[in-house]
C-alpha cells in the first residue's frame, strides 16, 4: 500500500516542490519501504508501524514540526507518499490547523510534534479541541524509555501534562502495542463526544522492530458510548413538544459533530413543526442562517429575539449544546418557566449546570431521526393558534432590529466591514475562521451560514491566535475554496508566524483584520466594569500589516475609508495567494447586544445608551 | 469562572460511597484523582487495588460528598473516563457493607496499658505487635467504629495511626 507516485500529487497542489523531490529520491532507489507483501506479519520499526496505522486510519495530512525525538517518524514520512506533511511554524498552530481541518471535513485531524517543548506548545490547541469537542490525534515524541523520569534533554511528562486537556492519552511502552494503541486513539477521538487524544511515542520504541495489528482486529475494551437513544424517551419528548405553545429549538456544535444526517434531520424537524430555532456559537450553520425560522445566535452577544424567546418559551429542546455560561447568563433566571429536553451524547452534560426535565442520551442525529419519525407517524402538529401567537411575539422582538448599526461618513464601522465582507462573498464557496474578541462576535452576528462545517471559531476556550492556523487547516482540506480568517489586530499577532506556512504550502488564505488598535473586548469590559480605566488594552507599536504581509511574500492591502471598502474586499478575494487586508475601523465601537455578566436574558444591553440604566451587579463583576 | 450550579437545586450535602471498576493501566488513578481535583470535588477516602489479575481490572472505592447534582456529575464524569468499565453508587443502589482496616500504635505502661488492652478487647481489635511499652492493634470495621477506637486510645498513649480507607461491596447476590 505504500505509495504510488500519483496518489501523492493528487493531494498536493500542481507545482508541489517537496513532492517531486521525494519522487526523485524514490527513483534513485532510496525508497526501500514500499513493499506490498504481508505487512501484517513482517517486522517493521515503530515509526513505520505508525505510518502504516495512520494510512489505515485514512490520514491524508499531518500538521507538524520535527525535532530530535520524532526524527524516526520524519524519516519514515520522507520515504512514503501517502501522507502529506504541512510544516507549521509553531506547534500550537499545528493543533489549530488540525482543528480547522477536522471541523471543516468531519474527519480526525492529525498532529505530529516532538518531545518537551513540542508537546507543551501543543497544550493550548489540545485544550481548545477538548472544549469544542474536535477530534484530534496528536502524536508526540518522547525521550527513550530508559531516560523517562531522568530530566533528559527535551523531556516533559507529556501524558501527565495533557491528561486534563485530552479526552484520553497513551504512552506507548511496547512496540507491538503501538499500532493497536494508534487505532484505539483514533477510535476514541472520533466516537462519542469527539475530542483530542495524545499518543506519546518514546524514541526507542520508534526504532525497535515490532508487529502490526490491523485496524479491523482492534476492539476497544471499555469505550462504548451510547449512540441510540431510548425509544421511550423519544416518545415522551414528542408528547411534550406536541403540547407546547411556545416551543424553541436551541442547538449547538454537537449537531455539526454528529454529521450530515443530524443537520438534515434538524432542518426537517424545525420545518415540519414550524417552531423557531436558535444556535450557539458552535452550532452556526447546522440550520440555514437566512431562514426566517432561525432567530440568530443566542447568549451573551446573541440577538434580542433569540434570548427573549429562550426566556419566555414553555418547551426548550436542546440539541447537542451544553448550557454554557455564555448562553445561559444568570442561571437562576435562565428560562424559568420551560420544560427542558436535552439531547446529548455525553451523559456528563446532562444536569451539569441546568436541571432538565427530559434527558435523552445518544447521538443527536439518531435522536432527531427517531423524533421526526415519531412526530409524523402519530400525525402530530403543534397548536397552530398558540404557535401563531408565539411567532407574533417573536416578530415584535425582531422588529427591534437589535443588530442595526449606523454607518455614517468615511470611518468604517467594524460591523459594516464584516457585513460587507459577508455580502461580497456570500455567493462563493467560502469558509470562515475567526480569532477571539469583538470581531469574532460580529462575525457570528453578521455572517449567515447556510451550511455546516463552514465556520471555525474557538468557542469554549476562547483562544486568541486560533483563526489563522485554523484557516490554514481548512484551506489544506479545501484547496479550491475561499478561506477567510476574520481577525483582530491583537489576535492575529499571536500566530502571525503561520503566514510563512501559507507561503510555503501555497495556501491562499485571506486574512481580514478588523483593526481598531485595541483589544476590543477587553476594552469593552473595562468600559462597562472598571470605570473606563483602560489598563494595557491599547495595542501600541502595531506592525504595518501591509509591509508585514509583503515581507512574508504575501499581498498586503490597507483600507481606511468606507468608500474604498468594497473594492478592497474584492481585491482581497481576487488576488491569488495569501492576502492580509488591514481594515482600519472605528476605534471605540462596542459589541451589542450584550447580556452583562451575571444578568438574565431579559436584561440585555441594546447599545451604549442602555448602560447607565442597568448597572452591573457586584455579583456579576466577579464573573468572567 | 463558570456561573456555578443552580443554587436552588439540591442544597443538601450527602456522603456517598462509589465503586469504580477500571482497566489497570498506567495513569488510571491519576485520571480519577485529577478529575476530582480539577473539578473541585471532595475525596474523603479512596482505595484502589487490582481485583482481577487475569483481566487487569482494578477496583477503586471512593467516599465523596456533595449535593445531589454534584454527586450525579461525579458519577457521569467518572463514567466518561475511557478506561472505566463501570461506576456504581453503592449508597444510592441499596444496602452495602463498608469496611476499613486500621493499625494503631499505642505507647504506655502501667494502668493505661491495661486499659488500652481492655478497650481493644471490647472493639475486637487484635494485637499484632507488642513490647513492654507499646502495642500495635489491628482493627477493622466501618469508619465510625475506627474513629471511636482511635478517640478512646487518644489519652492512653496513641502515637501512630495507619488506615486503609474504605472498601465497600453491595449486599446480596448481585456483583458489580
Image (cartoon, coloured by chain):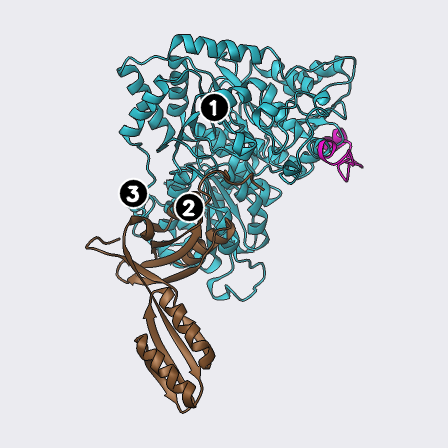
Chain colours: A cyan, B brown
Number of the front mark, 3 or 2: 2
Chain letter behind tag 1: A
Q: Are marks 2 and 1 in contact (CB under 8 Å)?
A: no
Chain letter behind tag 2: B
For the residues labelled 1 and 3, the Cα–Cα distance comes to 31 Å
Q: Residue at x 48, y 54 (%)?
A: A159
Above or below, A12 relative to A206: above
Q: Look at the numbered disc 3 and give the secondary structure of its residue.
A: helix
Query: Do the residues at pointers 2 and 1 share their chain?
Result: no
Q: Give the camera-side residue of A257 and B31.
A: B31
The numbered disc on residue A354 is none
Q: Look at the numbered disc 1 and give the secondary structure of its residue.
A: loop
Residue A352 seen in the current view: yes
Q: On the image, numbered disc 2 is attached to which residue?
A: B77
Q: On the image, numbered disc 3 is attached to which residue?
A: A216
Residue A530 is inside the magenta segment: yes
Q: Residue at x 38, y 68 (%)?
A: B164
Q: On the image, numbered disc 1 is attached to which residue?
A: A452
Residue A237 is inside the magenta segment: no
Q: Give the camera-side residue of A487 and A508.
A: A487
Chain letter behind tag 3: A
Q: Residues within 10 Å of mark 1 (few under 14, many from 20)?
A: many
Query: Do the residues at pointers 3 and 2 share their chain?
Result: no
Mark 1 or 3 closer to N-term? 3
Number of the front mark, 2 or 1: 2
Q: Which residues are magenta?
A: A526-550
Residue A85 seen in the current view: no
Query: Do the residues at pointers 1 and 3 share their chain?
Result: yes
Quarter holding the N terminus of chain B is: top right
Q: Look at the numbered disc 2 and give the secondary structure of its residue.
A: helix
Amino acid at each position: 500500500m505504500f505509495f504510488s507516485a500519483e496518489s501523492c500529487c493528487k493531494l498536493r497542489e500542481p507545482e508541489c516542490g517537496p513532492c517531486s523531490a521525494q519522487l526523485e529520491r524514490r527513483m534513485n532507489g532510496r525508497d526501500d519501504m514500499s513493499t506490498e507483501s504481508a505487512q501484517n506479519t513482517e517486522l517493521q520499526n515503530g515509526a513505520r508501524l505508525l505510518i502504516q496505522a495512520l494510512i489505515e486510519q485514512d490520514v491524508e495530512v499531518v500538521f507538524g514540526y520535527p525535532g530530535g525525538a520524532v526524527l524516526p517518524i520524519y524519516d519514515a514520512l520522507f520515504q512514503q507518499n501517502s501522507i502529506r506533511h504541512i510544516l507549521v511554524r509553531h506547534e500550537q498552530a499545528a493543533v489549530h490547523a488540525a482543528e480547522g481541518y477536522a471541523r471543516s471535513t468531519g474527519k480526525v485531524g492529525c498532529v505530529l510534534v516532538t518531545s518537551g517543548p513540542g508537546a507543551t506548545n501543543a497544550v493550548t490547541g489540545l485544550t481548545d479541541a477538548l472544549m469544542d469537542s474536535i477530534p484530534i490525534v496528536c502524536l508526540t515524541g518522547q525521550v527513550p524509555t530508559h531516560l523517562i523520569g531522568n530530566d533528559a534533554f527535551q523531556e516533559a511528562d507529556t501524558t501527565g501534562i495533557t491528561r486534563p486537556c485530552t479526552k484520553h492519552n497513551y504512552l506507548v511502552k511496547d512496540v507491538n502495542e503501538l499500532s493497536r494503541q494508534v487505532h484505539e486513539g483514533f477510535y476514541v477521538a472520533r466516537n462519542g463526544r469527539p475530542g483530542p487524544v495524545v499518543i506519546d511515542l518514546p524514541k526507542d520504541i520508534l526504532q525497535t522492530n515490532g508487529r502490526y495489528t490491523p485496524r479491523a482486529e482492534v476492539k476497544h475494551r471499555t469505550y462504548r458510548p451510547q449512540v441510540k437513544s431510548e425509544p421511550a424517551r423519544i416518545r415522551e419528548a414528542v408528547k411534550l413538544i406536541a403540547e407546547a405553545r411556545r416551543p424553541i429549538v436551541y442547538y449547538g456544535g454537537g449537531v455539526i459533530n454528529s454529521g450530515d444526517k443530524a443537520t438534515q434531520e434538524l432542518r426537517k424537524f424545525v420545518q415540519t413543526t414550524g417552531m423557531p430555532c436558535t444556535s450557539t456559537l458552535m452550532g452556526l450553520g447546522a440550520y440555514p442562517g437566512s431562514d426566517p425560522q432561525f432567530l440568530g445566535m443566542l447568549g451573551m452577544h446573541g440577538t434580542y429575539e433569540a434570548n427573549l424567546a429562550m426566556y419566555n418559551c414553555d418547551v426548550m429542546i436542546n440539541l447537542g449544546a451544553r448550557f454554557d455560561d455564555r448562553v445561559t447568563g444568570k442561571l437562576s433566571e435562565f428560562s424559568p418557566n420551560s420544560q427542558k429536553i436535552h439531547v446529548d451524547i455525553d451523559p456528563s452534560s446532562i444536569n451539569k449546570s441546568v436541571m432538565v426535565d427530559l434527558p435523552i442520551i445518544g447521538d443527536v442525529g439518531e435522536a432527531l431521526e427517531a423524533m421526526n419519525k415519531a412526530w409524523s407517524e402519530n400525525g402530530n402538529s403543534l397548536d397552530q393558534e398558540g404557535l401563531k401567537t408565539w411567532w407574533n411575539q417573536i416578530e415584535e422582538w425582531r422588529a427591534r432590529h437589535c443588530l442595526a448599526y449606523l454607518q455614517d461618513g468615511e470611518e468604517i464601522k467594524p460591523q459594516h466591514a464584516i457585513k460587507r465582507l459577508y455580502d461580497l462573498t456570500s455567493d462563493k464557496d467560502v469558509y470562515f475562521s475567526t480569532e477571539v474578541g469583538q470581531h469574532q462576535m460580529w462575525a457570528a452576528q453578521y455572517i449567515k451560514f447556510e451550511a455546516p462545517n463552514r465556520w471555525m471559531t474557538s468557542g469554549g476556550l476562547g483562544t486568541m491566535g486560533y483563526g489563522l492556523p485554523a484557516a490554514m487547516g481548512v484551506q489544506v482540506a479545501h484547496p479550491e475554496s475561499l478561506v477567510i480568517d476574520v481577525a483582530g489586530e491583537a489576535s492575529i499577532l499571536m500566530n502571525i508566524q503561520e503566514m510563512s506556512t501559507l507561503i510555503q504550502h501555497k495556501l491562499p488564505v485571506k486574512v481580514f483584520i478588523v483593526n481598531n488598535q485595541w483589544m476590543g473586548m477587553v476594552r469593552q469590559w473595562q468600559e462597562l466594569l472598571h470605570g473606563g480605566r483602560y489598563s494595557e488594552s491599547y495595542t501600541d507599536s502595531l506592525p504595518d500589516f501591509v509591509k508585514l504581509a509583503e515581507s512574508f511574500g504575501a499581498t498586503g492591502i490597507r483600507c481606511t475609508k468606507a468608500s474604498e471598502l468594497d473594492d478592497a474586499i474584492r481585491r482581497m478575494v481576487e488576488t491569488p495567494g495569501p492576502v492580509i487586508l488591514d481594515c482600519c475601523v472605528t476605534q471605540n465601537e462596542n459589541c451589542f447586544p450584550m447580556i452583562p455578566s451575571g444578568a438574565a436574558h431579559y436584561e440585555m444591553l441594546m447599545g451604549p445608551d442602555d448602560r447607565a440604566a442597568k448597572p452591573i451587579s457586584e455579583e456579576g463583576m466577579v464573573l468572567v | 469562572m463558570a456561573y456555578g450550579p443552580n443554587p436552588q437545586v439540591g442544597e443538601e450535602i450527602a456522603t456517598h460511597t462509589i465503586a469504580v471498576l477500571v482497566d489497570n493501566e498506567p495513569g488510571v488513578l491519576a485520571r480519577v484523582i485529577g478529575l476530582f481535583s480539577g473539578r473541585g470535588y471532595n475525596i474523603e477516602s479512596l482505595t484502589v487495588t487490582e481485583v482481577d489479575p487475569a483481566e487487569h481490572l482494578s477496583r477503586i472505592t471512593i467516599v465523596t460528598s456533595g449535593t445531589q447534582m454534584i454527586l450525579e456529575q461525579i458519577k457521569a464524569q467518572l463514567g466518561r473516563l475511557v478506561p472505566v468499565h463501570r461506576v456504581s453508587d453503592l449508597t444510592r443502589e441499596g444496602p452495602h457493607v463498608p469496611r476499613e482496616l486500621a493499625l494503631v500504635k499505642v505507647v504506655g505502661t502501667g494502668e493505661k496499658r491495661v486499659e488500652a488492652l481492655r478497650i481493644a478487647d471490647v472493639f475486637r481489635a487484635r494485637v499484632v505487635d507488642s513490647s513492654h511499652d507499646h502495642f500495635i492493634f489491628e482493627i477493622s470495621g466501618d469508619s465510625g467504629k475506627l474513629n471511636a477506637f482511635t478517640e478512646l486510645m487518644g489519652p492512653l498513649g496513641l502515637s501512630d495511626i495507619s488506615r486503609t480507607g474504605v472498601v465497600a461491596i453491595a449486599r446480596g447476590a448481585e456483583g458489580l
